Amino acid sequence: MSSPLTEKASWRALVAHAQEVRGAHLADLFAGDAQRFVRLHRAFDSILFDFSKQRVVEATLPLLFDLAAEQGLAERMAALFAGAAVNPSEGRAAMHWALRLPSERTCQVAGEDINLQVQAELQRMDGIVQKVRSGQWRGVTGEVITDVVNIGVGGSDLGPLMVTEALADWRPSTASPLHVHFASTMDGSQVSQLLGGLNPHATLFIISSKSFSTIDTLSNAATARGWLERELGALPGLLDCHFIGVSAAAERMSEWGIAPANQLALWDWVGGRFSLWSAIGLPIALSIGMPAFRELLAGAHAMDEHFRQAPWADNLPVLLGLIGVWNTNMLGINAHAVLPYDGRLKELPNYLEQLEMESNGKSVNLAGESIDYATCPIVWGTIGPNAQHAFYQLLHQGTEPVTCDFIVPARRYREAQHGGATAELLAQHELALANCLAQSRLLALGDGAVKDAASLPRNRRYRGNQPSSTLLLDELTPHSLGALIALYEHKVFVQSVIWEINPFDQWGVEMGKRIAVDALACLRGELAELPGADASSAGLLARILGESA
Ligand SMILES: O=P(O)(O)OC[C@H]1O[C@H](O)[C@H](O)[C@@H](O)[C@@H]1O
């Protein structure tokens, strides 16, 4: 049996190496090496990955590659792309990469060409998109659909929402634009607010749920259905005209009342947080059209191929993943901020929170043993320029070490996308770029390079040495966004291999759902007492029910 991770030779070599590097300041590393950026950045497709502001030196990467080799990264990648059951706790493959294969490719898994199924579903999706976008899809009273509401949560919400917002510039210009909305919250606040402003005759709902059993989604769907029935009457054909279902559970969709013609499928080998490339991406395709959706897939596929083929020293997902491991396990940094300097990527941090933390927020390894090393850091973020006015204080002067990913497109507001970029908007983009560069520089170097800073009182000084990466996109396009998302997906996989955990399950979200059933029964008077309740929960429940605690 192989030794535990922290006793492996490559791990111990990294620990020893980290002892040497810990004391080094990024300002000195830059001062001592004029070629640092040249050596420590890589580019693929339209993404430049600059990791020269990470606390790594020449010897760090080879040691990380040794660790990756000892952990069997090459073999695990081969298993992922062979459709093996890389999610053993659920006995499933994880083949999100197959969702973005070019149509002509075959993908044989267990004697079946998976890509035939994928392409057939994309065709069906295309048909629906054309029908809705062209105005042929009508509400039950004959009105053209003007609004689509995606009802879903987690992976059935965050990815589609993030991409739909990020690519809003790619909405084809039409006389009557289609408005795409999202409702996810269990408490009904989003759906109730939306319904108040929508025309029931012209609204189409997508019920998006891989399992079709998520209570949040089913309760929002029930609210939407009740609203339509009250507003339009229980007309025959109401459900057929106003509801589409996307799920891996066809039977449950049928039971709910969704006709087979309105059902789009995904498969159990697509994890929820990896599913935006499937029919779960329908709201994206409705918003930007199918050709742009296919460009998104093509960008992701390009990254898949890069991940499979590029040597590790040039491989963006491998580098991003291993540098994360370096920061977490060797430098002891357990917080990671995602900071897009582009308002269109506002939802990216939320999306990555699920992708990274639901995948790698684990403390039991694949062998079922508790582990004694850190795994996924706490990931959070928001639009960088706004965060400058909110939590950058902590990044610059707090007591916690934090790593950051700065994400920014080099070019924006080109004529084609905006019917005329104004000088003002171009200037605003320059402002965002300048701030992105300034912040990562100050975080890395501290105030040493700033004139007269040394004479400032201590509370106005910046110590620097906070590591960051910058992901510079040529432009934010469907293609580059697809590649960027796939880059993070594979980063998560690389890290899971090092940490010996299963990134494709999420057992930590199950028990809370289960015990909420009892609390609900108490609230509804169906259960007198919360089984095994602690004093806090019982007291809160009593207060809600108006009883004296
Ligand atoms: O798509 P669904 O089956 O409705 O699941 C929606 C979400 O809920 C679950 O609780 C999981 O934590 C997520 O991974 C999933 O994306």
Image: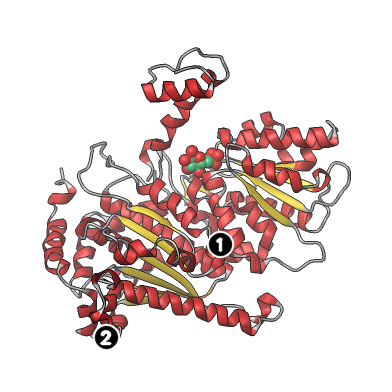
Estimate how packed mark 2 is, as few (under 14), some (14 to 19) or many (20 or more) residues with alpha carbons within 10 Å.
few
Task: Tell me: residue 224, above or below residue 457.
Answer: above
Say what amino acid the circle numbered 1 marks. Leu
The residue at the far front in this view is 457
Say what amino acid the circle numbered 2 marks. Gln
Residue 116 in view: no
* Residue drawn where x is 69% and y is 65% of the image: 171
Report the number of discs.
2
Give how far apart the Cα atoms at labels 2 and 1 are: 35 Å
Estimate how packed mark 1 is, as few (under 14), some (14 to 19) or many (20 or more) residues with alpha carbons within 10 Å.
many
The local secondary structure at tag 1 comes to: helix
Task: Tell me: residue 311, above or below residue 11.
Answer: below
Quadrant in the picture for the C terminus: top left
Nearest the eye: 263 or 350: 350
Q: Mark 1 points at which residue?
A: 297
- Determine the image quadrant of residue 429: bottom right
Q: Residue 35 carries which label?
A: 2
Q: State whether label 2 is within 8 Å of ligand 1.
A: no
